[in-house]
Amino acid sequence: KLGERKAKAEKMFGLMDGFLKNDAVSLQKDILDHVEYTVARSRFNFDDFEAYQALAHSVRDRLIERWHDTHQYFKKKDPKRLYFLSLEFLMGRSLTNSVTNLGIQDQYADALSQLGFDYEVLAEQEGDAALGNGGLARLAACQMDSLATLDYPAWGYGLRYQYGLFRQIIVDGFQHEQPDFWLNFGNPWEIERVHVSYPVKFYGTVEEEVLNGKTFRVWIPAESVEAVAYDNPIPGYGTRNAINLRLWAAKPSDQYDMESYTTGDYINAIVNRQKAETISNVLYPDDRSYQGKELRLKQQYFFVSASLQDIIRRFKDLHNNFDEFPEKVALQINDTHPSIAIAEVMRVLVDEEHLDWSKAWGIACKIFSVTIHAVQPEALEKVPIDLLGSVLPRHLEIIYEINYCLMEELKKIFGQDYDKLSRMSIIEEGAVKCIRMANLSLACCHTVNGVSRLHLETLKTRVFKDFYELWPQKFQFKTNGVTQRRWIVVSNPSLCSIISKWLGTEAWIRNVDLIAGLREYAEDPDLHAEWKNMKKVNKMRLAEYIETLTSVKVSLDAMFDVQIKRIHEYKRQLLNILGIIHRYDCIKNMDESDKRRVVPRVCIIGGKAAPGYEVAKKIIKLCHAVADKVNIDPDVGDLLKVVFIPDYNVSVAELVIPGTDLSQHLSTAGHEASGTGCMKFLMNGSLLLATADGSAVEIAEEIGATNMFLFGAKVDEVPALREKGTSLKGSLQFARVVRMVRDGHFGFKDYFKSLCETVEEGKDFYLLGYDFASYLEAQATADRAFVDQEKWTQMSILSTAGSGKFSSDRTIEEYAEQSWGIEPCKCPF
Ligand code: KOT
């Protein structure tokens, strides 16, 4: 029998001709086959988009091949696996990233050009997968790339939203939101697994059951929704490994509302069934404040429950004793959003696997680790008890039980210190009684990670002070990083070639520490020439994009000054705009000879405001109002242009960052947990103008503070400054520019009134007034540096050369060693 099967397999293998071939002719044939059989167009007549689809499918075939082999190999080796749970992944485009990581870009470019197509043009056809809001979600995507590249046996788990982050359109300078129905034209990067599906239950009651003389609590749910897996292969670079990002979509379950069928209400039963799908319909677009929404809680539990069923099934395939679970499974929760997983693991182990409570808790405490991405206490999730009790009644009981144990333990240590106990309790008493998801995570996770050194300090001394004092050993930090594959190799190919040429190797793409080797050539005139040329080409591309989108023509000699990120008061885009107004005001008051000394600037701002965040929306409007006035002022000309780039997303970042001379990171010290945009700019040799916040502190250590423009209050000065109610008198210039806005210099006087009030004396929580003078000084320093182009280029090279530490490869290695206890598992070629 065995011999028969082997012979059959050999025959099949022969027919398949081994692996897919990657020479130009084979690629062409595959592309044409996909045109004909997948896209179903005639091979004599297909357009760029159809060519992209066929191309994408031929890449997908190659990904699937590696992905199968990798999982086969993982199964054989059965290493401890990391499961990365995140409610958001901001993947952006996949084509160029996959082709780069597969190492067959030249062959594809060749194949396509022989077919009369341009690889780069086809790549532009792809839309972004924007299943996330901002930093947290893009970090998850970068980390998946590093996990694959470093051969770690890891899985990502998340939700397959049908609507990603809204598209931003600008009408008369105001933000409007439009749905991002990103699956409209199909998604070649996912594999639908209709057979990998699990029921996820909601609502109902909890009853007592006696089994073999023991009583158990049993959840009798009232609703069931099916979770169907969609797998997204993530290829590593320079390895055969391709790991899996499994996203769950909600589908009606056959068990759903069976009663309606039996009562004969067929049409309504179908309509009701369809409602199940709403769970995975739409991503919440507010990236900090969404407390207490039922749908949000259902999304969280839905993807957590399906993922855990999947993980436990995989474990049980090879093991039958849960004592071994922590040796095989590490569960990472990305911020507290998936922290209901802790209660779910307890429910499965206690209610379904019938382990006793303390044994189950021991296991849970060994498998979970969490990373916190926020600083602000209001970003910590709270779920009203009533809501949790209705949607997940058994989980509420379990959380009460966990809290009871926690409180008992704390009482033994802190006695009657009720203030402390109530601060540390998982239950928050108050008008609306809530579950503090962060406290639940802190009680269970063996490791709590901050995302930069400074961020951990803030967590230790402020938000989680009590817990830190109790369990200092749990607290660690892993400074964030970004993947150089996407942020240099894919998005800045000219820089990529320069680096490889000067280092004499491409090894830095997997081992980015090597990039420090560029320091040696920081003053080499030949490198300077190549570097400046690279920047110019990238600026040209960006200038074209700006002109197409906004009709503003910009000069390539100007300094391209960029701030792109979500719009938030703490990120202080308003400080930037007020600085621009100041610059404008100065130019207006200059005579011609003064003007000749002005360094021309193109000020670029981009970012989305949460749909309900009024202040952020006003900031966007103010940016447009200022642009409208400045850009047509003949007194100003090319000395100053202001541009708002609409619909900022990952692909826009890939275009903007390589063309940036100066990037701005202006958060009030102590508010940006890390910041990752700055790392992408750093890698691309843009100089940083930044506060000493988040990862910028560590960047300054790596490249030297003199190679960037630091300004503003330090983190330990902030509380006192706030207390004092900083004085505008300290900065007459600040008062002047705010007055210009308030008095209607840029129109919309009434509309901007409340925005101006946010920075009024005594109300200026984010200290714009206090930091303004220092900000202008840093800007002036940047101007002076730009005049000396050789010096600037040297600083730019040193920025790239010092960016090695900020690779997500380094971050992931630290996580693997210090938090997850996993080892690489490299699939042989
Ligand atoms: C959103 C909701 C609740 C809690 C945190 C967030 C969050 C934080 N979303 N994005 N972040 C950012 O995460 C990045 C990656 O760690 C950080 O670099 C950045 O500072 C955070 O703001």
Image (tube, grey):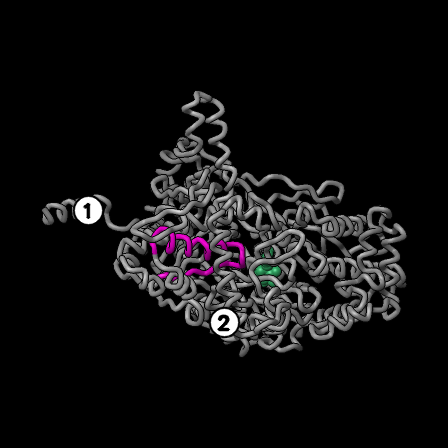
In front of the other: 549 or 219? 219
Q: Position of residue 698 (x, y in %)?
A: 59, 74
Answer with left or right where residue 524 lies relative to residue 262: right
Q: Residue at x 62, y 67 (%)?
A: 463
**Disc 2 to disc 1, how far (Cα)?**
54 Å
Residue 582 colored in magenta in the image: no
Answer with left or right where residue 512 lies relative to residue 467: left
Q: Residue at x 24, y 50 (%)?
A: 18
Q: Residue at x 54, y 59 (%)?
A: 335
**Camera sees residue 329:** yes
Callout 2 amino acid = Lys
Mark 2 falls on what kind of element? helix
Q: Residue at x 57, y 75 (%)?
A: 469
Task: Return the residue at label 1.
Answer: 14
Quadrant in the picture for residue 195: top left
Answer with left or right where residue 84 lies relative to residue 19: right
Q: Position of residue 526 (x, y in %)?
A: 57, 72
Count of all numbered marks drawn on residues in the image: 2
Q: Which residues are magenta?
A: 329-354
Residue 474: which numbered mark, if any?
2
In front of the other: 676 or 95? 676
Mark 1 falls on what kind of element? helix
Give ligand 1's quarter of the image. bottom right
Callout 1 amino acid = Gly
Q: Position of residue 412 (x, y in %)?
A: 52, 73
